[in-house]
Image: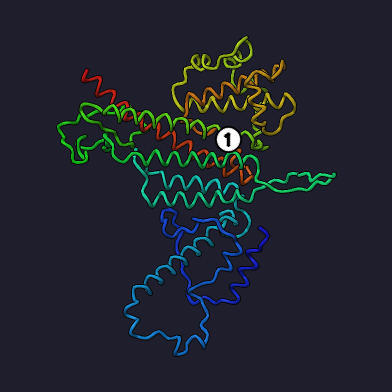
Amino acid sequence: MESSPSSDQNEVSASETPTSSVSSPYRRTYSDISGLSHRFDVQSFYNRPSNTNAVVHEEDLSEDAVEPKDNVDGDGEDHDRDSDVDSAEDAELEMMRERFAKLLLGEDMSGSGKGVCTAVTVSNSITNLYATVFGQSLRLQPLSTEKKDLWKREMNCFMSICDYIVEVVPRSLGNNVEITETKLRSDILMNLPALRKLDNMLMDILDGFTENEFWYVERGSSSMNSNNGGRDSGSFRKVVVQRKDEKWWLPVPCVPAEGLSENERKNLRHKRDCANQIHKAALAINDSTLNDMDIPDSYLTTLPKSGKASVGDVIYKQLCTAEKFYPDQLLDILKISSEHEALELADKVEASLVTWRRKTGGLAHSKSSWDMMKDMGGDAGNDKNHILAARARSLLFCLKQRFPELSQTSLDICKIQYNRDVGKAVLESYSRVLEGLAYNVVSWIDDVLYVDRTVRNRDD
């Protein structure tokens, strides 16, 4: 945008002296005062006329302009309604000013320039928004209208940033005449509509859980049959889901004593398959976006001199000596028993992967997704470092598939922290939160199907 928000704001401040100021605290959970719902132009935003600060001219106070007193009582409701609308608009404008101030200041309200860059601010904001909207969603049920509106409005604002991220491409007009024109950047043009569609599909899946044959009770409650929706408590049976100890806070699903109906079971399986495909698609977009980010120098300085020193002798021997490498068999040999061990192994393999890539051609930054796909497909060449890098990549991919709830690796965290590309920050954070939501939906459906399967097996 070519307009100058600061100059326009000064002009408005000089011509309009506000009679009162509304100070609304920053609360992400209050959707009714959020001002990030629509895409807007900065110039039109600051030049927008203010209803509360309008200048009243003397000619407007003539007797013809004064409304008869008889109509004051009749229009009392309209005046109150207009006053409420004006107050809401003022609150939205104040919220928008505050949000954009934090964005430009990098969350450093001292103004000393010590804040984080815009890309990191946007990434953190999307992550915090996801925690606000979905942090308390621990079961299969639709989102509340307030949270759904909050999610759509805020995400529309963050995604509207990408409308102005363009690239310059040449276009030929014939007769040796060539001009340049702008279009949306290719990665945004391809991935952002896909993420929007995945988001809508997830919302549709959650909205479908309105009339369910299952219900939830809190773990540790005195009766597993309490809060059963008014059904006959004698027709239900207590079944405890076998869940990891660190997930003790999740509610426990319950099903009827005879189990779920065939239609309900079929519907749950269909929704699980859809959510699983959404998870894979979001994971692929997130992985592609992270791979396209540059590797920070701070990470490169921590790498060992050799990849063998990072992964250890056992893994290096399997990567180096085997004629045909099977990552699944190697993971079976390692016998990884916890997510912590899996994350530790992923960090080691990724460090070795970057080390071997640097040795192949002095690679100091990231590698394109297409090059990595060629490596995984066996087109890495005969160089030993190429082969080791390709096998390490396939091992890392298999490890993430076996542990889909795996946290981000040290390299991923470092890339996000030092990333300066706002478009990649939006794509990475958006795909990451959708990946987490889709995985949660799959896990919740698996819990219900497990309880149903346990009940039917007992009856048999």
- Label 1, secondary structure: give it: helix
Q: Is residue 242 left or right of residue 361?
A: left
Position of 281 compared to 389: left or right? left
Which residue was labeled with disc 1? Answer: 412
Residue 357 location, quadrant: top right
Give the farthest residue toward the right: 176
Which quadrant of the figure contains the C terminus? Answer: top left
Name the residue at 37% across, 42% down: 207
Question: What amino acid does circle 1 point to?
Answer: Asp
At 56% from the left and 24% from the top, the residue drawn is: 396
Instruction: Give the camera-side residue of 122 and 108.
Output: 122
> Residue 427: image x %, image y %?
57, 41
- Residue 421 coordinates in the image, percent (x, y): 64, 44
Categorize mark 1 by other alpha carbons within 10 Å: few (<14), some (14-19), many (20+).
some
Q: Position of residue 224 (x, y in %)?
A: 21, 34
Q: Residue at x 31, y 26 (%)?
A: 450
**Residue 94 spot, x, y in % from top left:** 50, 64
Q: How many marks?
A: 1
